[in-house]
Amino acid sequence: MPVHFERRREGDNMILSAALVLVVAGRTYCDISNDTGTSLSTTPTAEHRSHGMAGAGAEFVLSDLGGLYSVWGHDPDARGVDRIGESALRRLDLLLEMRKHTTSANCREALDVFIEGRAELKLWALKMHFASVVLPDALLSGGISHLGDFDACLSTGATYCLVDVEVRPPSAPASHGLDEWSPREPPNGINATLWDLLKTSGNRRRYRRDSRQWAVCLPEQCYRTAPVGRCETNDATIEESSQLGVLLASTFRGMAQSLGVHLRVNLNPTYCSTSKKNDAAGSFSLRSLHSQPRFLFGSSFILLFPLLVVVASTRYALKKGALMNTDCNKGCLQSMTDCFAMQTNCKDLLRRQSSSLSAIEGMRVITTIGVIAGHRAMFPSGGPVLNPEGFERMYTKMYFINGHIIVCAFFVISAFLDARRCMKLYDKFPKLNLETIMLQLMHRYLRFVAALTVVVAIEALWLEHFGSGPLWNQLITNGEVEMCKTFWWSHLLFINNYFNPSTQCMPHTWYLAAAMHMYFGTPIVMWIIHRCMQRSTSLGCTVLGSLLLVSAGVLYGCTVAFDLRPVTLIIPMFFRHGNFATNANFLNQYIVTHTNLVPYAAGLIFGALHHVIQSREWTPSKATKRNMFLGVVFGLVVQVATIFSGAAYLFVEGRHLWLESMYAPARMVSFSVPIAYIIFACSFGAGGILHRVLSCTPMIALGRLTYSVYLVHLTIILASTASIRQPVYTSDFTFLKSVASDTVLSFLAGLLLYICVEAPLSKLLMAAIEKFASRKRGENVKSDSPCISCKSS
C-alpha cells in the first residue's frame, strides 16, 4: 500500500487527522446546508422541478451500455429540467461524495487520508483530485469521452477506472435501434438545448451522445475492498461483486436529480488499471519466466526467426568475402539456413518482374493502402473523440461508408492468378490428380500460415507489454490479447470467420480464412471449366457465367433469409464498444466465405479467359488496345458510381426487402468485374498510363510485401488508439497524417516480417515441393546433394 494511504498509528497524529477531517466535513456540510450556490443538492428544488422528474437519479446496471439502441429520438417530450440553478453548475467533489456513501471502512479511511492530503496541498492528492472526470461539466458539455489524467492517477498508487454512463430522461420510452427517424440535427436550431442534442442519439449517422465514458481515480482500497464484476449466478453474488458500481451510482445520484435525468452506470472490471498492473504489463521479469512456460516457449519461437536471419546473413557475408570454404558439401541444416540470408531475400524483393501481369503488384499496394486508410478511419472512431461531429461529417462521405468494398480487389487478384495456374496445370496433366491437388492445397496453407503464426504469437504474448493507456486494458489486454490466447487455433485453421467470428483477435484476418476456403474448391471448379473449354469455348464461357450467377444468387438469398441490409453500414457507433462484433450484417454477410464468392468468381472468369486467349497467342491491334483502354476508364467510372450508390441505403429508412436485397450482389458485380477487366487489359498492354504506374519497380517491390503488411497493420492502429491519453481531434489533415504514418510503419513492420519469416519459409516450402515432385517423377537425385536447395523464387 502506498505510503500516503497508510494509517497513522501514533496517538498525536491520529487525533490531529481526525480533527482535520471533522473540520473539513463540518465546513462542507455547513456550506451545503446554508449556501445556495455551493454544491449539488440530492433533491431537486422548486426551480428544478419539471414533469416526470420523479424518476431522476442513478442506478448501477450489469448490462453493457454502448450498444446500437437508444431511448432518445422518438419521444419529443423526452428531456430533463427546463432550468438549473447556480448550484448545479458547481463542481461535484467526487471523492468526498463517495466517502459519504461508502460502506467499506478501509475505503473510507483511504478517502479520509486523501481529503486531508488535499487540504494540505500534497501533490499526490492534487493529482488524484484532478485525474477524475469533472462533473457536472462532462454531463452538460455533451462530450462522449472524458479520460481525466491516466498517468497522474497511477503515479499516486491509485486505481484508474473508465465508467460507462448512459443518460436517460426520467421516464424513458422503450429503446429502439438507430434509425433515420430520429432527428439528424438538434431541434430548435440555434436555440437547441442539451436535451435536443441528446435526441440525435437515436440517429444512426450520429454518435450516441447519451452514451458516455467517465474516468474515475480512486484509492486502491476502494477498488480492492469493493470489487466489481459481472456475475450471472444469483442476486446475492451480484450484489456482493458490484459494490463499487453501486457506490459510484450513489455518488452520481444527487447530480442526476438536480438535472432531472436518470443515469445508468456500468463498471466493467477490465476497464480499471492499477499501478501494479501497469508496471507488470510494461516490464519483464526474468525470474518469473519459469512460471510462464507458454510465454517462454512462444517468445523462443518468435525470436528463432530473426536469430536464423542473423546467422544466415553472417554466413553469406563470410562466403562472399572468401573467408569461408565454399567448396565443401553443405549439409541439410546449412542449406535450410541459407534460405534466411537477408542479402538474397532483399535481392529477390527488388528483382524486376518481366511478367505481363506485373500490374497486379501495384493493385495490391493500392488496395492495401486503401484498407489501412479504412481501418484508420474506422477503429479510432470507436475510441475517445474530441469532436464527434468531425467523424459524423466523415460518415456522410460515401467513399468512407461504402469504401470497405475495396477488399473485393484481393479476392479478384487471388482468383485471377489461381485460375491461370490451374488451367496451365491441366494443360499438362488433363486428368484430375488428387495427389497434385493436395500438394497445391498444402503449399497454399503452409505459405499463408507461416507468417500468420508468428503474428498471432506476438499478439497473444507480447502485445500487452508494448504500451499502456486508458483504453489499453479494454482494447488490448482484455480484448485483442485475451481473445488471441483463447482462439489462436481458429486463426491457424482458417475457420475464424465462421467459428466465434465475434472475437476481436485480429478481426481483419477473416479475409485470409475466406480466401483459403475459396482456394480449396478452386482446383475442382477449374478442372470442370477446363474440360468444358476443351469441348467448346462457348460451353466453357456458359459455365463461367453460371458460376457468377450462382455466386450472386447465394449473396442475394442470404441477404433475404437473414433479413439483412444490402450494405454493411459503417456508422459512427459501429466500432464503439465492439458493436461490430455483434452486428448481423458483419457476421452473416461481410466476413463469411459464401457471401464473398462474387469477386472470386469474377476473378476466375477473367483468369480462365486470359489463359485461353493467351494460349492461342492472340495479340491485340492498336485500335483494339485503344478500345480496351476506354473499357478501363469506363470500369473506373463504374467503380466510383458503385461506391457512391450506397447513399440510397444510408439516408433512407424505408425498406423493401426483396427489391433492396438485389443491390447486394449488384454492388459486388459492378465493383469486381472492372477490377478483373483492368488486370486483363493491362496484361495485353492496353492499360495505358495506369499500367505503367501499377507495374513500376517500386510498386512491384512493395507489392511483394502486401501480405505481411496486411497482417501487421491493424495491430499498429489498435496499439496507437489504445495508448492515447486524451480524446483525439479529427479533421481531414489529421486523418491523412495518421494514414501516412500508419502506412509507413506498416510497411516497415511488414518488411521485417517478410525478411524474417515470409520470404525464407516460402523458399523452403518451394524447395521441399520441388524435391518431392522430382522424386515422384523418378528423376535422379545425387546422394551428395543437399536435402534442399534454396533458390531465388
Image (tube, rainbow, N blue to C red):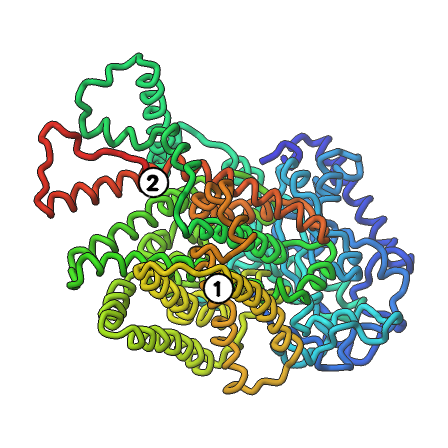
- Circles 1 and 2, Cβ within 8 Å, touching? The answer is no
| Residue 603 found in image quarter | bottom left
Mark 1 burial class by Cα count in 10 Å: few <14, some 14-19, many 20+: few
Residue 543 seen = yes
Residue 159 seen = no
Identified at 61% across, 42% down, the residue is: 741
| Disc 1 target residue | 624
Q: Amino acid at mark 1?
A: Thr
Q: Residue furthest top?
A: 323
Q: Position of residue 535 (x, y in %)?
A: 22, 73
Q: Position of residue 357 (x, y in %)?
A: 41, 52
* Discs 1/2, front: 1
Earlier residue among tags 1 and 2: 2
| Disc 2 target residue | 294
Relative to the observer, which residue lies in front, 577 or 761? Answer: 761
Image quadrant occupied by the C terminus:
top left
Q: Position of residue 158 (x, y in %)?
A: 63, 41
- Left or right, residue 327 beside residue 763: left
Identified at 39% across, 63% down, the residue is: 497
- Left or right, residue 66 beside residue 699: right
* Secondary element type, mark 1: helix
How far is mark 1 from mark 2, CA to CA?
61 Å
- Left or right, residue 316 beside residue 724: left
Relative to the observer, which residue lies in front, 97 or 345? Answer: 345
* Secondary element type, mark 2: helix
